[in-house]
Amino acid sequence: MIKSGKIKVNKELCSGCGICELACSLYHENVCKPSWSRIKVKRKFLQLEFEPQICIQCEWPSCFFECPAKAIEINLTTGARYINEKKCTGCAKCARVCPLMPDSEIIRYKTINGKKIYFKCDLCMDRKEGSLCVEMCPRNALIYIKK
């Protein structure tokens, strides 16, 4: 199976600003809506603890093997494991088998015309400059690791 790059998170550097979430949702959805972002910053404001959560692009992704609609695909150029939203039937099997769920919000959904559509990080695979969240993070809490 083709390998993928990964986004490494340094939660010690994260300030919880949410720029990564806004940039991601704007890039992928054309709207600044953190709930539609492929990265989620878990925030504990009173403890001043912030932790970006993002798909770790598993080497043997259980979501890929479990999806009955074959909506989980692997980009042949970048190796990114992503959900083809046009094929997604909303069954949630990908989210149920993800080893990071439910403690993390790695695989999320949006509701469009009454239908749940699941999505997750695709490493901005169509963007030649690479992952936008990494580029936009003002504290360098996100680092792209090549495959």
Image (tube, rainbow, N blue to C red):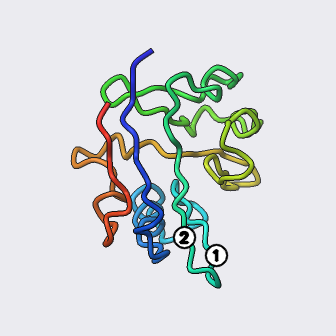
Q: Nearer the viewer, residue 49 or 136?
A: 49
**Residue located farthest toward the bottom when viewing the structure as drawn:** 46
Q: Height in image: 51 above or below 56? A: below
Q: Height in image: 129 above or below 95? A: below
Residue occupying image coordinates x 40% and y 68%: 13
- Amino acid of disc 2: Phe
With 51 as the anchor, is 15 left or right in this view? left
Residue occupying image coordinates x 33% and y 57%: 134
Q: Quadrant of the N terminus?
A: top left
Q: Which mark is residue 79?
A: none
Identify the element where label 2 is drawn.
strand
- Return the x and y of residue 144 as percentages of the image width and height: 32, 47
Residue occupying image coordinates x 74% and y 48%: 102
- Amino acid of disc 1: Lys
Among numbered discs 2 and 1, the one appearing first in the sequence: 1
Identify the element where label 1 is drawn.
strand
Disc 2 to disc 1, C-alpha distance: 6 Å
Are there few (<14), some (14-19), or many (20+) residues within 10 Å of tag 2?
A: many
- Return the x and y of residue 70 as percentages of the image width and height: 62, 22
Residue marked by disc 2? 50
Residue marked by disc 1? 44
**Residue located farthest toward the left when viewing the structure as drawn:** 129
Residue 141 lies in what quarter of the image? bottom left
Q: Quadrant of the C terminus?
A: top left
Q: Height in image: 43 above or below 125? A: below
Are there few (<14), some (14-19), or many (20+) residues within 10 Å of tag 1?
A: few
Residue occupying image coordinates x 76% and y 54%: 114
With 105 as the anchor, is 51 left or right in this view? left
Q: Nearer the viewer, residue 110 or 2?
A: 2
Callouts 2 and 1 close, C-beta under 8 Å = yes
Q: Nearer the viewer, residue 62 or 142?
A: 142
